[in-house]
Image: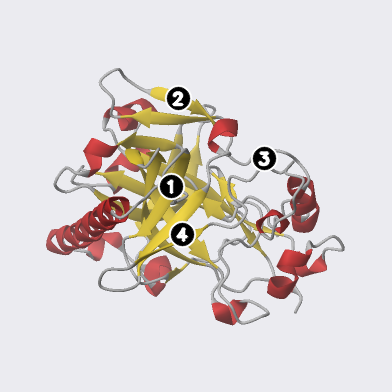
Amino acid sequence: MKYIGNLAASIVLCTFTSSTALVTGTIQIVGKSGGTQFLPGSYVSTFPRWNAEVTGEETISLSRLLGSGLDRLDPVPTLAQQFVDPTSNKELWWPADLQTLQVRPTLDFFLKDATPEYVLAGMEVQVPSDSSKDGREWKNFGMNSQPLASQWTTFDIAVENGFRVEMFYGKTLLTSNNEDDVIVDWKALRDHSADSCVEDDISSIEKNNIAIKYAKGTQNALGTMGNLLAGLDESSPLAHGMHIVSIAITTDWTDLPAPGENGYKLVSVGTVDSDAKELLNLDPELVAMSAASILNVDVSRIAPGAESEFMPEAYIALYKK
């Protein structure tokens, strides 16, 4: 089995550094009339991340993603500082002692001073209660546990009819000498039977219904964001600075397929294109021209968290209780 390093050693390293390198390279921003623009990954790592959820007819709950966007040199210790920044735009790590990971699609928003400027295809990952030692759900279960899109698009793209977020997973079939020339067998990630789902058996009508379902959920997320911003005042943490807010487009969680020895790719696509999956094997320049937002991470099994001698106290309840 392919293990990547030691989870707890990585957690300790990340905890005591002022910034992380988990958001690597540059973030592409597409859909602008001036062409593609870029943000450095180290800069994006400083943005706090939030989850917004409708909890009542007129109530929207806003919660901070623990460990995200923190000043690690702050002399005043906080509970959040006991957690690592879980954000990554390249990898999703699956500790071997967690039996199940679940995922659901989200629409993410980049806000600057409470104004939405960009949207991101997103996904939210959790350890379900029956897989954690303390019987609770966990969102931050270590490094590389909450993916972030590496290609963003402008807010005005998301308000177009038909814009939606869909998720896919796939295993590499062929790689040439050119590292960018990769062929992947993509399948829609929709339910427990995703591993055995035969895409050719899905009719065009069913595919259209699926697209409509996800488009509706995406538009509902846009409405939730509008209501959230309409109710903000100066005391809100979102009122100033730069933030990323995630809103789920479905209430259901999907069990991820087991990574196996070589792992697989997990993708979230935000697009107005009629066939989201068709975008995934296109040249990156063509994908950028489509003004789609892409989240693309490699899912890999890593060493068991409970085996570490250096587990920070914040994670003991998850791995060792």
The amino acid beneath tag 2 is: Phe
The amino acid beneath tag 1 is: Leu
Residue 146 visible from this viewpoint: yes
Q: Is residue 294 left or right of residue 316?
A: left
Residue 291, image quadrant: top left
First reached walking from the N terminus: tag 1 or tag 4? 4
The amino acid beneath tag 3 is: Thr
- Distance from disc 2 to disc 1, alpha carbons, whole Å, reads 23 Å
Q: Residues within 10 Å of mark 4 (few under 14, many from 20)?
A: many
Residue 124's disc is: 4
Q: Which residue is mark 2?
A: 38
- The number of discs equals 4
**What kind of element bears circle 4?**
strand
- Distance from disc 3 to disc 1, alpha carbons, whole Å, reads 22 Å
Q: Which residue is mark 3?
A: 20
Outermost residue, right side: 309
